[in-house]
Amino acid sequence: MKVDLSAQPLIQSSLQSDDPQISSIEIQLNYLRSYRVMAIIPAHNESSMIGEVVRNSCKYVSEVVVVDDCSTDDTARIARKEGAKVIKHIYNTGVGGALRTGYRYCLNSNCDLVVQLDSDGQHDPAYIPVIVNHLINGESDIVTGSRFLNESHKEYSVVRRAGIRFFSGVVKAVGHADLTDITSGFRAYRIDAIKALFDIEDKHWAVDQTLRALILGFKYEEVAVEMPKRLVGKSQFTPSTFFLYPISMFKVISIALIFKRRHKTQ
């Protein structure tokens, strides 16, 4: 879905945020004149929120792509109605698999920049210009929205915050980068980064992708983004998943270390 720049030259937060990045300073959509920007939204049974997320995302990008990961509700129909290109999986692959499908579509669509955000409403699409402009002006390859660079992380449970800090610590130790919100799915990429990081794991894709990006030398930055707790649906993070994550994470870390060793020998 194309944006009519003459009809909508400026944007404001779709969620009426108090963040000065998007409420006090209106951000121009000039990047859409020079870059083809596509948004990927992986979704599974998010019919209650997908319409609003797609509708608001369409304001700030050239095209929105929803990858419906075998939903059993009206996610696909609603997303299509709101203007998204919908790619539907016939079986559930997980977030990593849905993102790979979205990346493949973008790589075949002659785009310059890719934004990805969650379908549950936690990622305010009004931050898309903030992240994209940071990507362009900072000459970065990847920019991630971080809730730990503002106060919004305090809304999450102690278990959730501890999990995010744990994974961020793992990346700091292995990738030698001081990042604050490694599990954030609100990201923007240059297309060259997508080409190099296409083959991500189905589980723990964020850690896998970030480690590979750092090993390959991509310039990786974070920008403050408010991420309130999801209003509807059920989070995948529970005390049980938190304690099981270090075990399942072993595979991802092992693959990253092997990848790092092979890269050094090339």
Image: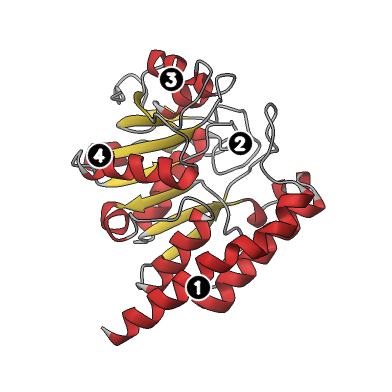
Give the secondary structure at mark 2. Answer: loop
Instruction: Of the two numbered discs 1 and 3 on the same chain, state the one appearing first in sequence.
Output: 3
Instruction: Of the two numbered discs 1 and 2 on the same chain, state the one appearing first in sequence.
Output: 2
Point out the frontmost of discs 1 and 2.
1
Give the secondary structure at mark 3. Answer: helix
Point out the frontmost of discs 1 and 4.
1
Q: Is residue 167 left or right of residue 206?
A: right
Report the residue marked by disc 1. Answer: 254
Comparing 22 with 36, the one in front is 36
- Under mark 4, the amino acid is Arg
Does any portion of residue 137 appear in the rendered image?
yes
Comparing 16 with 113, the one in front is 113
Instruction: Of the two numbered discs 4 and 3 on the same chain, state the one appearing first in sequence.
Output: 4
Comparing 92 with 124, the one in front is 92
Report the residue marked by disc 2. Answer: 122
How far apart are labels 4 and 2 at the CA level? 24 Å
Q: How is the image coloured?
A: secondary structure
